[in-house]
Each structure stands twice: as C-alpha cells, then as structure tokens.
Image (cartoon, rainbow, N blue to C red):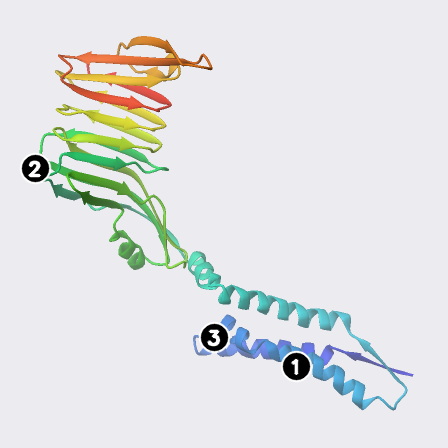
Amino acid sequence: MKTKRVGRISMAIVLIALGITIFIAQIYNLSAVKLSIKFWPIMLFLIGGEILWYSYKYKDEDVIIKYDVFSIFIVLLIVVVNLGIYGLVETGMMPRLTAMASSQTFAYKLPYNELELNDEIKKIVVDSPNCSNLTVRSGESNKITSSGSIHITADSEEKAKELLDNEYIINHKSGDTLYISFIDNSDYDNKGYSAHPYDFMLTLPENKKVEINGGDDLQLIVDDIKSDWVIDSMNRTKIRLGKDLDLKINAHADAKEMLNGNAKWNITEEKKEGDGASDIKGELLYGNGSSNVYIINSNEITVDELK
C-alpha cells in the first residue's frame, strides 16, 4: 500500500514564490512585504488544491493520503505572518512601525518667540505643562518672550525640522486676558513621528496680573513684580527673589516642612474644620508689600533670596 504526503508541493511552491518575490523586490527597489501581502491568499489555494488533487487522483487506488505536518505548518506559518502584516496595514500600524524602525531622535531649541502686549491686556493666565519644567521670569518690558527645548523623533532630519516649525506654545486672547498653554507630547499623522517639548521658559511683564495654574515644576525668577500673581495647583514651586523688592508672598501648605529655602518664613498655624489637620500659612514681606504673590495648593514651596 502506497503512501502519499500532502503539503510538500505547496511548501516548495510557496518557498520558490517567496524567493522570486524578494528577488524582484531587490531588483526593482520594491517592498517585498507589500508584494507578499498582495499574493498571500494564493497559498491557501495551493494547499487546498493539492489536497483535492491527491484525493481525486488516487480515489480508486489503494493509496493512503497523509498530511505532511511539517510542510503544512511552514505554509500556514507564512500565511499567519502575512495575515499579521496585512492586519497591521489595515489598522494603519504598518507605516508607523516602519517609521519607528528607521527613526532617529533629534534635539533642538524651540524658536525664540516675542509677543508685544498692548494696554488692553490686563491679565495673563498660564496653563502650565503637566510633564515638563516651566521657568517664568518677570521682565520690565511689555513683552512676552518664550522658548524651550524639544526632542523630535522622525525618520529624517528634514521631517524633524518640519515638525520643529509647529506651534508648541499657544497664545489665545479673550477680552482683557491673554491665555498661554503648552503642548507637552504630540504625535503626527499616526506614523511614528513624535515631538516632546520640555523645559519651557517664559518672560512675563511685571506690571500685569498673572495666574499660573497646574503643572509639575515651576521656577519663578523675580526681579520685580508690580501687580498680583497667583500660583495654583503646582506640584513644586521654587522662587528666586531679587533685591530691593516691594512684595509680599502668601503661601499655604499642609506642613511646615513644605516651606523651604533660605527665606525666613513667618508662619502661622490654623486648624481646619473637621479632621483637625493643620493649615500652614507662610508669609514673606519685602518693603511695604505693595504687590502680592499667592501660592495655593502647592505640595512643596521653596523661596531663596539673593543675599
């Protein structure tokens, strides 16, 4: 009794076809992956056709038809791999993975921007970046200047410089208030290009009201302030004070240990209602305290004076 193994011919054809596909792709500078994706369903026809052919040819003969497990496994493995690649293409992941495989990370400084404010703007509201440091400096001029650093991941420096031209510090005017916000992390076209700006820096006019909300780390460099500033919901706030200020700093903290720096805090303690937890109020007075800096909902506050 003869034995015929099904699957060997299919495997041989598939391997030959795969070799030809790769050969053609190299000669004509084409994508072997894309060519394989187009023709992978033929593999199913091959193995199915081989089974039907053997069943028909030896139906009247005393022949045992067995499946060549290894050959069929190889063919199915190639099918599964191509199906996986096809799925990545269909979901839009393939271009992104391809870009990521050939991408590089470039480091740049964000372009220096300058915005002249008119007298209509009375207040500036800054929504701090969540995952980046923010440095704010008070300035004498009626201008807002901004800059920062950025890491861009792209498959070429040309594409990286294209992403560098995008806007990462956004200004929006509403009435007499100017709003400033930041783009922390950005993906472009869902193709593996990414930009991660960090270490933002702002110079704000000292004569405007300022409100700085949220964020992780804030470093405030104060040469002079001639209006009231509010810092709200910052994780860590570090302030460096210049000399000859006419300023009062009012800080709220949950514990004395949260008020740090070389400044000599005047601390008062009050009890909150209900749970008995402490509400620490720290004050720093310079000159007559004509202007105020209010710090609320900050986990750690550090104030250093220039001696």
The mark that comes first in sequence, 3 or 2, is 3
Which three-letter amino acid code belongs to the residue tagged 3?
Answer: Gln
The quadrant in which the N terminus is found is: bottom right
Q: Quadrant of residue 118?
A: top left
Which residue is painted at 87% across and 91% down in the image? Answer: 60
How far from the left and from the top, in percent, is residue 201? 24, 36
Q: Nearer the viewer, residue 19 or 211?
A: 211
Which three-letter amino acid code belongs to the residue tagged 1?
Answer: Phe
Q: Is residue 292 left or right of residue 60?
A: left
Residue of label 1? 45
How far from the left and from the top, in percent, is residue 200? 27, 38
Q: Is residue 102 visible?
A: yes
Considering the numbered disc 3 on the image, is that residue within a helix, a strand or a loop? Answer: helix
Numbered label tally = 3
Q: Are there few (<14), some (14-19), or many (20+) residues within 10 Å of tag 3?
A: few
Which residue is painted at 20% across and 12% down in the image? Answer: 285
Which residue is painted at 83% across and 88% down in the image? Answer: 58
Residue of label 2? 119
Q: Is residue 148 visible?
A: no
Residue of label 3? 26
Label 3 and label 1: CA atoms lie apart by: 26 Å
Q: Nearer the viewer, residue 71 or 229?
A: 229
Label 1 and label 2: CA atoms lie apart by: 77 Å
Q: Are there few (<14), some (14-19), or many (20+) residues within 10 Å of tag 1?
A: few
